[in-house]
Structures are given as structure tokens and as C-alpha cells.
Amino acid sequence: MFCQKCGEKNKDNVKFCEHCGASFIGKSTPKKTATTRISEQKSPIVACLLNLLLLGAGFMYLGQVGRGFKYLIIGLLLSWTIITPIIMLIMSMVKSYELANLINSGKVEIITGKIITK
């Protein structure tokens, strides 16, 4: 069983957490299973289309909000040039498509906005 206070794993029949001392008496703590780590499938096409609608939105859809805002802000700041936003749009569509495929294949996972390679 897992402690609700510190999150550490304990034996099933203990009354107190072996790590932080929190009481398990009168509390039911759900067991963590393998299904809690399954990440949500992301559509590469949706990520591309979101980038087409709003530069950086595809990355936000994939869980990388900071990266999405960077693309959006840089695109807006450089919008007076014609070629730079077009290049950024194409690049963001390709990169978000590739990232969605990596997430779906299980090779990477997004945890609090950071890419974790498995």
C-alpha cells in the first residue's frame, strides 16, 4: 500500500507508514497499479492542425506549454518578417508530429512539461 502523505510504498498490513509515520488506521489507501502510468495517446494530426491554427498550440496539446508559448511569442515578435513565421510554422508542425509519435510509441513521456526518454 502507498502512503497518502509521503507517497512511499509500505507493506500491506502495517498501521503506520514506515517512512513518515503517518497513520493508516481507518483510512483506505488505494494500491497503485501499472494502469496509473499509462500516458494518454496523442494524435499527431491534431498536434499539426493546432500548430496551423495557432503557432505553438500543438506543443501545448502535447503537454509542453512552455515550448508552445516560446513558439507563439517568437512568431509574434518576428511577424513583421514574412519568411520567419512560415519557417517556424512548418518546423513546429513537423516537431509536434514527431513528438506525438514518440509519446504514442512509449519511447518518451511528458512529465511536468519535460520530455523523459525511456
Image (cartoon, grey):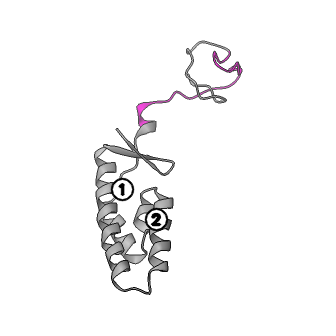
- Please give the range of residues in magenta: 16-35
Badge count: 2
Mark 1 = which residue? 42
Q: Residue 65: x and y, percent?
A: 50, 60
Towards the viewer: 118 or 91: 91
Question: Which of 6 and 72 lies nearest the eye of the viewer?
Answer: 72
Tag 2: amino acid: Gly
Q: How far from the left and from the top, in percent, is residue 20? A: 68, 21
Q: Quadrant of residue 43?
A: bottom left
What residue is shown at x 44% (from left), y 69% (from top)?
A: 71
Task: Say whether marks 2 and 1 touch (CB < 8 Å).
Answer: no
The picture places residue 48, in percent across and down from the top left corner, at 33, 68
Measure the alpha-carbon separation of dots 2 and 1: 16 Å
Q: Secondary structure at mark 1?
A: loop
At a point 57% along the width and 18% down the height, the residue shown is 10
> How crowded is the residue under tag 2: few (<14 C-alpha within 10 Å), some, or many (20+)?
many
Quarter residue 17 falls in: top right
Mark number for residue 103?
A: none
Residue 4, position in %: x, y?
Answer: 64, 30
- Name the residue that disc number 2 marks: 68
On the picture, is 112 further left or further right than 49?
Answer: right
Q: Main secondary structure of the magenta part?
A: loop
